[in-house]
Amino acid sequence: MNWTQVCEKEALPEGAGVAAWLGSRPVAIFNLGHRGLYALDNRCPATGVSLLARGQVCELAGELYVCSPLYKQHFHLTTGECLEDTELNAIPIVVKADAAGVWLAGEGA
């Protein structure tokens, strides 16, 4: 697996999402503190607009979701599955952090 460093961990606000680029791909990264880091494709599957990083993170039935700001669909932070419409899925991206920073699986450039 190839990893691309996107930022230092301190650059991610806790409890919110930020937008980043993995090469030409828009990515939403969510820092949930002790609950971990999550990353999804930033494009909302319903609209194609890059805005999931601006969505509100919430917990429903013990699972973590981000609520899309436009039409309020909830996308699971681990699987990308949409709670309201099984035909919509945000693409999950493997993310990790170490002393050097935050890394996304995949090629940058």
Image (cartoon, rainbow, N blue to C red):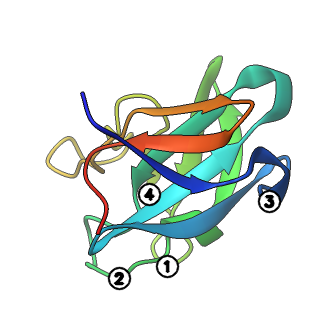
- Read off the residue under disc 3: 11
Q: Where 94 falls versus 21 (above or below)?
A: above
Packing grade of label 3 (10 A; few <14, some 14-19, many >=20) is few
Q: Amino acid at mark 1?
A: Leu
Q: Amino acid at mark 3?
A: Ala
The one nearer the camera, 18 or 57, is 18
The secondary element bearing badge 1 is classed as loop
- Read off the residue under disc 1: 70
The one nearer the camera, 70 or 95, is 95
Packing grade of label 4 (10 A; few <14, some 14-19, many >=20) is many
Q: Are marks 1 and 2 in contact (CB under 8 Å)?
A: yes
Q: Residue at x 45, y 73 (%)?
A: 71
The secondary element bearing badge 2 is classed as loop
Q: Are marks 1 and 4 in contact (CB under 8 Å)?
A: no
| Label 1 or label 3, whichever comes before in sequence order | 3
The image shows residue 41 at horizontal and vertical percentages of: 35, 57
- Read off the residue under disc 4: 73
| Label 2 or label 4, whichever comes before in sequence order | 2
